[in-house]
Image (cartoon, helix red, strand yellow):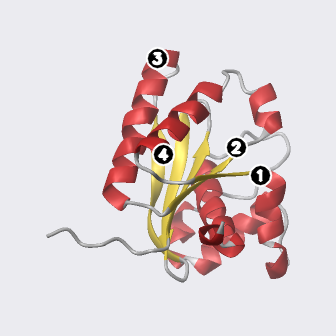
Amino acid sequence: MLKKPPSKRILGISLRSQRLGFAIIEGSVELVHWGMIYYEKNQDARISAASKRVAVLLERFVPSVLAIERSKTEKAHSPENLELLYRTIRREASRSSVPMFMFTRIKVREAFQDFGVGSKDEIMALLGRMFPELQPNLPPKRRLWEPEHFSVPMFDAIALAVACWRRDCFQE
């Protein structure tokens, strides 16, 4: 007999051109699972890999909602257009009957204002305190001239899931 999933389980996804970060939280903000998924630069292989892996996450964890960040600047400045990846994830969520919530970076930061943090580095540090198991993966503070640390999309996905929980996406 299948175990009924918790009524409040959130899958957060943060996209980049060659990887995506994901996180599952449930209940009163318990971090269940998190990680990174890497895929090739080739557009068709990337779409196929992302679609299969998101479908597996949806099937395995049966989230109540999916939270994803949608950034206009990311779309404009990305070397490869992420629009197909967004559509692919939307299609997979729809197939699984999982509502999808789009968050802007500003809305994510607003969700953390009560904690007195606002920058991406401050949010990641707070997440490291909230979930001690993340400490080994906490990226160093980024300097302006440095590229983004490889684990940042994972922390962005966790932040999205927490923002969705704080916004109570289940009521909408």
Q: Nearer the viewer, residue 67 or 154?
A: 67
- Tell me which amino acid carries mark 3: Asp
Q: Which residue is mark 1?
A: 142
Sequence-first tag of 3 and 4 = 3
Q: Kindly report the distance in space between the C-alpha atoms of the residues bearing marks 2 and 4.
A: 28 Å
Q: Kindly report the distance in space between the C-alpha atoms of the residues bearing marks 4 and 1.
A: 33 Å
Q: Nearer the viewer, mark 4 or mark 1?
A: 4
Name the side, left or right, on which 86 lies relative to 93. right
| Label pair 1/2, CB-CB below 8 angstroms | yes
Q: Nearer the viewer, residue 129 or 50?
A: 50
Name the side, left or right, on which 5 lies relative to 168. left
Sequence-first tag of 3 and 1 = 3
Q: Which residue is mark 3?
A: 44
Residue at the image point whose x is 59% and y is 70% from the top: 170
Q: Which residue is mark 2?
A: 148
Q: Position of residue 38 (x, y in %)?
A: 46, 36
Q: Position of residue 111 (x, y in %)?
A: 77, 69
Sequence-first tag of 4 and 1 = 4
Q: Which residue is mark 4?
A: 93
Q: Quadrant of residue 146?
A: top right
